[in-house]
Amino acid sequence: MTLIKATRFTLAIALMALFTVSPALAQVDTATQGLGQLETWFTTWIPVGATLAIVAVGLGLMFGFGRMDIAIRMVLGLILIGSASYLVGLFI
């Protein structure tokens, strides 16, 4: 039993070391790649997440989980968050 725990721990440490060292070995330009990833988050993933959250709020209202006045505030906030992140992403 102790051997299994030690092997799992060693394997976890080896995998963490492999994942942290691999970008350094690939000689990736982290500045350009980092800004590209940030732009992708701002123009794609945050608006998609906000849209999915709006759908979840709508489903919650449909099944009677919540009040309409709170849902309207949440949906307006999510629309503002998605739109603002997309606009910020255009300037990156």
Image (cartoon, rainbow, N blue to C red):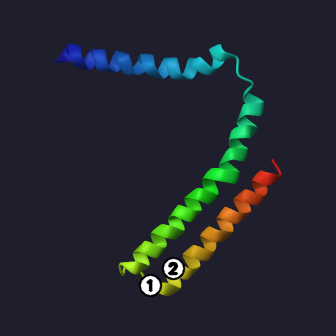
Position of residue 78 in the picture relative to residue 67 (left or right)? right
Position of residue 21 in the picture relative to residue 29 (left or right)? left
- Residue at mark 2: 71
Q: Residue at x 38, y 22 (%)?
A: 12
- Residue at mark 1: 67
Q: Residue at x 41, y 74 (%)?
A: 60
Query: Does the residue at mark 1 contact the one at mark 2 (Cβ under 8 Å)?
Result: yes
Report the front residue among 17 and 51. Answer: 51
Q: Amino acid at mark 1?
A: Arg
Report the front residue among 89 and 6. Answer: 89
The spot of residue 14 in percent (x, y) is 43, 16
Q: Is residue 67 above or below residue 58?
A: below
Is residue 65 at all visible to an observer of this figure? no
Q: Residue at x 66, y 65 (%)?
A: 81
The spot of residue 34 in percent (x, y) is 71, 35
Give me the disc on residue 29. none
**In the figure, residue 23 lies in which quadrant?**
top right
| Position of the N terminus by quadrant | top left
Q: CA separation, marks 1 and 2?
A: 6 Å
Q: Residues within 10 Å of mark 1 (few under 14, many from 20)?
A: few
**In the figure, residue 20 lies in which quadrant?**
top right
Q: Is residue 35 above or below residue 3?
A: below
Q: Residue at the right extreme?
A: 91
The spot of residue 25 in percent (x, y) is 63, 14
